[in-house]
Every structure is written in C-alpha cells, then in structure tokens.
C-alpha cells in the first residue's frame, strides 16, 4: 500500500472519531472518552470509574481500503462498575474488596411467608427471574445486594464461570439447587451466603 493510502485511512479514522466524540460530548459533557485514534496518537488509555465511551471509528480498515462494504463503527459505554476476582486473592468491585453479607431478616415467620409467596407464584407464571443476567445476579450475591439466587436452563458455562469465582472469593457459596456440588456444565446453579444454603435448598425442594 502506498504511504498516501495509509494517510487517507488515518484521516478517515480521525474524522469519524472526531465526529462521534463531538456529538457525544454535546449530549454527555461530563463523560470520558477513549478512541482508537486518540490512543494511537498519545499511547495511553485510562479507564476510570467515570462513565466512559469507548470507540473504534472504523472497524474493518482493510475492508474499507479495498472497497469491501463490511465496515462498522463500534461504540461501547462503560458505567463504572467492574467486578473482578482472582482465585485465592479475593473479589473486588472497582478495586475495593467485597464480601457477602448477612442480608435481610430471616426468622421462621419471614421465611415461611417468602416460601408461600414463591410457591403461589410458581403456579401462576412460567418462571421467576431476577434480572435476566446470571453473571450480575451472582455479583449481587458477592456484594450482599442479593440474599439467594437460583436459575435453571441458562445458556451455558459462559453465563456463570466468572460470577461463580466472584461469589466464592467474596465468601459466598455456589452449588447445585439440589444441594450437591456445582457442575458448570449442568445449566443449574444456586448461590447464597453460607448460612442460607440449607434454607434455599429446602425451599427449592418444596417447589419441585
């Protein structure tokens, strides 16, 4: 490729990135921005907790150069919540350690009412869902936002592999809804803090 061809692509990339960033900045003046061309020019990428737009202004540069119409603009928004975990090192939210928590009131009267409510719902709806995301529900267990989580029939191991590590490293437990060991290939998962495991297993048995 001739040098001027490379220059043309660079100019096109930069023009697209400038157009996108200028428009987004008008709508979201307090947000941050990371672009392929900006990173290439300055050599740094700083991803913080602030809302950040990450842009590839011309994804498919080689196709663009050769006139092949398979080119797109890639725009993603990160909103400042990053859950991470390393086996044996702990679980973190934005770099801060997280731990499962005791959660809400769980005396017998409360548990009985909850069980009755779930039993009645099971006869009226096809399924009960938290948020539609196994991974985020597991992160909710890890940081104490959720007491228990159960789901059967999710897509596959990719839905739960990361979240299961996060729960365990935060001090929670991940197991099969029957109470047996968790099998990542079985498309069945339950999670809670350790003190709630038996109660959740008993509840699920009652709804079978």
Image (spheres, rainbow, N blue to C red):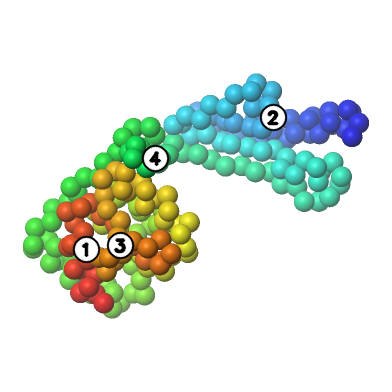
Picture quarter containing residue 190?
A: bottom left
Looking at marks 4 and 2 on the same chain, the residue that comes earlier in the sequence is marked by: 2
Marks 1 and 2 sit apart, C-alpha to C-alpha, by 51 Å
Front residue of 171/53: it is: 171
The percent position of residue 77, horizontal first and vertical second, equals 53, 40
Q: Are marks 1 and 2 in contact (CB under 8 Å)?
A: no
Mark 4 falls on what kind of element? Answer: strand
Q: Which mark lies nearer to you, 1 or 4?
A: 4
- Can residue 136 be seen? no
Q: Which numbered mark, 1 or 2, is in the foreground of this view?
A: 1
Residue 189 percent across, percent down from the top left = 34, 62
Write the residue at 57% across / 27% down. 45
Dot 3: element: loop
Q: Which residue is mark 1?
A: 200
Q: Who's the residue at 69% across and 33% down the image?
A: 17
N-term-proximal mark, 1 vs 4? 4
Q: Residue furthest right?
A: 2
Q: Quadrant of the C terminus?
A: bottom left
> Which residue lies under the disc numbered 2?
37
């Amino acid at each position: 490729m001739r040098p001027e061809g490379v220059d043309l692509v660079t100019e096109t990339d930069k023009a697209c990135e400038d157009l996108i960033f200028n428009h987004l900045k008008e709508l979201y003046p307090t947000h941050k921005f990371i672009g392929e061309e900006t990173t290439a020019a300055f050599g740094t990428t700083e991803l913080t907790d602030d809302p950040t737009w990450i842009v590839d202004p011309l994804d498919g540069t080689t196709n663009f150069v050769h006139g092949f119409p398979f080119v797109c603009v890639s725009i993603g928004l990160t909103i400042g919540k990053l859950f991470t975990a390393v086996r044996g090192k702990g679980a973190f939210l934005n770099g801060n350690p997280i731990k499962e928590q005791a959660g809400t009131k769980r005396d017998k009267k409360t548990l009985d009412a909850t069980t009755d409510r779930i039993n009645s719902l099971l006869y009226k709806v096809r399924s009960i869902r938290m948020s539609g995301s196994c991974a985020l529900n597991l992160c909710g267990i890890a940081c104490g936002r959720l007491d228990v989580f159960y789901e059967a029939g999710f897509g596959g191991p990719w839905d739960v592999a990361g979240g299961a590590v996060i729960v365990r490293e935060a001090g929670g437990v991940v197991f099969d809804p029957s109470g047996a060991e968790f099998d990542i290939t079985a498309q069945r998962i339950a999670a809670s803090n350790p003190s709630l495991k038996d109660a959740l297993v008993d509840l699920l048995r009652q709804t079978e």
